[in-house]
Image (cartoon, rainbow, N blue to C red):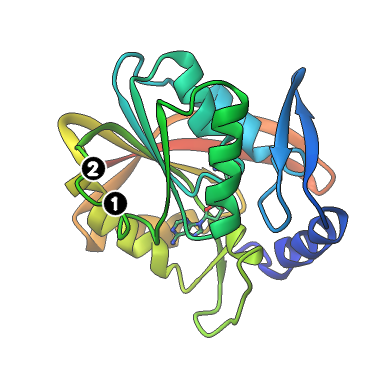
Amino acid sequence: MYDYTQPLRRSEASRAKVRQRTDIELRGRHWTLLPDVFSPADSKSSLAHLDLLKFPVGGTFLEIGSGTGLIAVSAALAGCRAVHATDLNPAAVRNTALNAERFGVADQVTSVESDLFDGLRDAPAFDVVYWHSNNVWAPPELDINVHELAYVDPGYDAHRRYFREARRHVAPEGRVLIALSSRAGRAELEELAAAEGQALRTVDTTTVAEPEGPVVYELLEVVPL
Ligand SMILES: C[S@@+](CC[C@H](N)C(=O)[O-])C[C@H]1O[C@@H](n2cnc3c(N)ncnc32)[C@H](O)[C@@H]1O
């Protein structure tokens, strides 16, 4: 199992760098980054997953854990009719709304503070539900702050709930997706999904060179067993 203390140390380092609102550049576009929000400039994961995703153009998209809004705003720019974005971190909810405004898609993007699906009220069933999760395992009793919550999920409690609840929010032909990496405990997550009557099927992967060695980023579909 990947050592959960590594991302916690990394989160402290990136927190120290982002003490005030700043701009980050990603592939020639400038995005607002607020303090205490997961930075897609400091992790290769967000862009790697963006490249693996196919948005439901003309349809509806729900992103859990939207952070800066990179994915939710990209979905709107790609032509999704309606995008909902949720995050447990209030700074991330503000950050997503700011970037939706910045890129002129505020009318397509609804940004909501929510623990997974809990804060979605009267939302429609979505064509695609997506979560680039905080997929590094950590001990259940670990006390973490909201910034660290972008990286680790103590006891995989949120993942268990995602596997249980996500299907209630997709349209009949819709898809539930989860973005993981080789740092995640894939075997444990398969077991948790199976306990909820779900299986994890690989949609696509990409391997990225990182200081610790090659990291595999995986887009998976959560399908009923
Ligand atoms: C790995 S970051 C991904 C951020 C963004 N989607 C991206 O790709 O750059 C995970 C995000 O999930 C959020 N998150 C963690 N647990 C959550 C939960 N239970 N409900 C909603 N969001 C959660 C974190 O605050 C963080 O913004």
- Tell me the residue that label 2 is attached to: 123
Whether the residues at callouts 1 and 2 have beta carbons within 8 Å, the answer is yes
Q: Is residue 49 visible?
A: no
Calculate the distance from the C-alpha at mark 1 to the C-alpha at mark 2: 6 Å
Determine which quarter of the picture holds residue 40.
Answer: top right
Q: Which mark is residue 74?
A: none
Disc 1 Cβ-to-ligand 1 distance below 8 Å:
no
- The 10 Å Cα crowd at callout 1, few under 14, some 14 to 19, many 20 or more, is some
* Quadrant including the N terminus: bottom right
Which residue is painted at 66% across and 63% down in the image?
147
Q: Residue furthest left?
A: 172
Query: What's the residue type where badge 1 is placed?
Result: Leu
- Residue 39 position, x and y percent, is 71, 45
Figure label count: 2
Q: Secondary structure at mark 1?
A: loop
Determine which quarter of the picture holds residue 104.
Answer: top right
Which residue is painted at 86% across and 61% down in the image?
16
Query: What's the residue type where badge 2 is placed?
Result: Ala
Q: Residue furthest bottom?
A: 141
Residue 35 or residue 147, whichever sits in front: 35
- Residue 189 position, x and y percent, is 41, 58
- Residue 94 position, x and y percent, is 57, 48
- Tell me the residue that label 1 is attached to: 120
